[in-house]
Amino acid sequence: MAKHSTTSLLPVQKRWPLMVLLCIAFSTATAFFIGASFSSCNSHDYSDNNSNNFNTPIHSSASDGGAVEKEKNPLSFMKSKLVLLVSHELSLSGGPLLLMELAFLLRAVSARVVWITNQKPSERDEVIYSLEQRMMDRGVEVLPAKGQEVVDTALKADLVILNTAVAGKWLDAVLQENVARVLPKVLWWIHEMRGHYFKLEYVKHLPFVAGAMIDSHTTAEYWKNRTHERLGIQMPETFVVHLGNSKDLMEVAEDSVARRVLREHIRESLGVRKDDLLFAIINSVSRGKGQDLFLKAFYEALQFSQVRKLKVPPMRAIVVGSDMGAQTKFETELRNFVAEKKIQDRVQFVNKTLNVAPYLASIDVLVQNSQARGECFGRITIEAMAFQLPVLGTAAGGTVEIVVNGTTGWLHPAGKEGITPLAENIIRLATNIEMRKTMGQKGQTRVKEMFLEQHMSHRISLVLKKVLQKSTREARR
């Protein structure tokens, strides 16, 4: 890839972090950090008025950005607390990385944090080794998932956080007769939206934990209804906590010089010209993420522009999230479609990467096209909005709690019926530079009001306080 010396334009204090970003951007990473998406949520507590007895209240801590106290870390009350974090797996996917982020937030206030990974390969895995080393460097203790030491830790812990529904299997397998003693101090953090996670073997203890924390209202309602209808169990007290962008990402997003340098580097490496209009879908490549429907919509938009003789910049599409080392059947289908429609000069596939900031700086529009029930949250959406990008998203899942339709982007239906509406929205943005600019600015404003790291810390702190109070009461009985 071409590398030129535009970093010399930066002030001295900015060169080092930007060079790190550039190095990461041009290296081949082993996996892609799955992000998330949301729109307008209420800040008050609420519960359904439905009289069914399974309607556990769902509390919202979603949009209280203006109330965040900036001077004091909202998690400071966790100092010296012992927190056990239980992850189903340790990989470069969204769930484990999000739990690691919480681990670092807790370590920043001097909490004692212990991490276990329930399922590991028998042979050494370089990704797991690297992530564990990163945690230990930050003071997180890493223990084996089984054995008396972890049982003792769970019994002594002030708080146990299970991450994802599948992590529930660890309770019986490891704690055995001690499960009932630990459940009153368990906070279950759920990110899944797929039906195959609704198995009693995973979630049979869910009604008895101190609380559940879920990333969006849509997902919380889905879990409440599905657990009742399919499993006949009741959700515990449930808290909706919207995620937030890291300080590091926001620093780049708000630095116009850094964005320009990254944009030039990435575009040159992709062979994208300055005036090309770049639409990107940034997600792990799988049918559920909707890359196939996006490419069909993009092709349809190209046809519309020709038939209607529209004056639009040259449109390009980029699919970030490929696995060049192990191309799947689905990705082969995507590449065959591009070849069949003869749009190879318009579409590019990029290997999955941990660092999305360089690509967000280089594109013009983000497409969040997750299918079926959509994303539980989809952090990539708020990351894109931080970079002043309009978002074209499916009207499903957490995306509807992030993207304000017609204000920060446009929503379209999931499924095949969404192909033509998405194509029309692509044309709508391609033909209106002022719309792209205005939506991008309003998106960044929305992020600063609702979706920053301090907002997320504040929201999580409210949940942890309540769960700790509840577990303390239970321990005194």
Image (cartoon, rainbow, N blue to C red):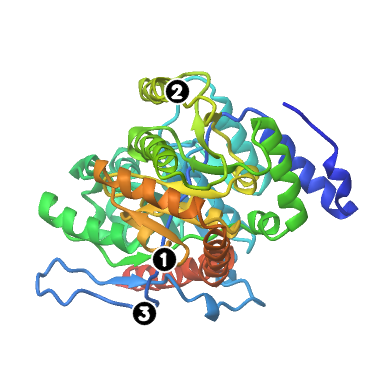
On the picture, is 443 further left or further right than 19? left
Q: Position of residue 71 (x, y in %)?
A: 67, 77
On the picture, is 105 further left or further right than 288? right
Mark number displayed over residue 44: 3
Tell me the CA gap for discs 3 and 2. Answer: 52 Å
On the picture, is 201 further left or further right than 60? left
Mark 1: few/some/many CA within 10 Å (<14, 14-19, 20+): many
Residue at image x 32%, y 69%? Answer: 474
Residue wearing tag 2: 342
Residue wearing tag 1: 404
Please tell me which residue lies in front, 92 or 232. Answer: 92
Residue at image x 56%, y 62%? Answer: 434
SS assignment at label 1: loop
Q: Earlier in the sequence, mark 3 or mark 2?
A: 3
Looking at the rendered structure, the kind of residue marked 2 is: Lys
Q: Single out the mark in the foreground, 1 or 2.
A: 2
Q: Is residue 451 visible?
A: yes
Q: Is residue 187 visible?
A: no
Q: Quadrant of residue 213?
A: bottom left
Tell me the CA gap for discs 1 and 2. Answer: 35 Å
Q: Position of residue 307 (x, y in %)?
A: 39, 40
Looking at the rendered structure, the kind of residue marked 3 is: His
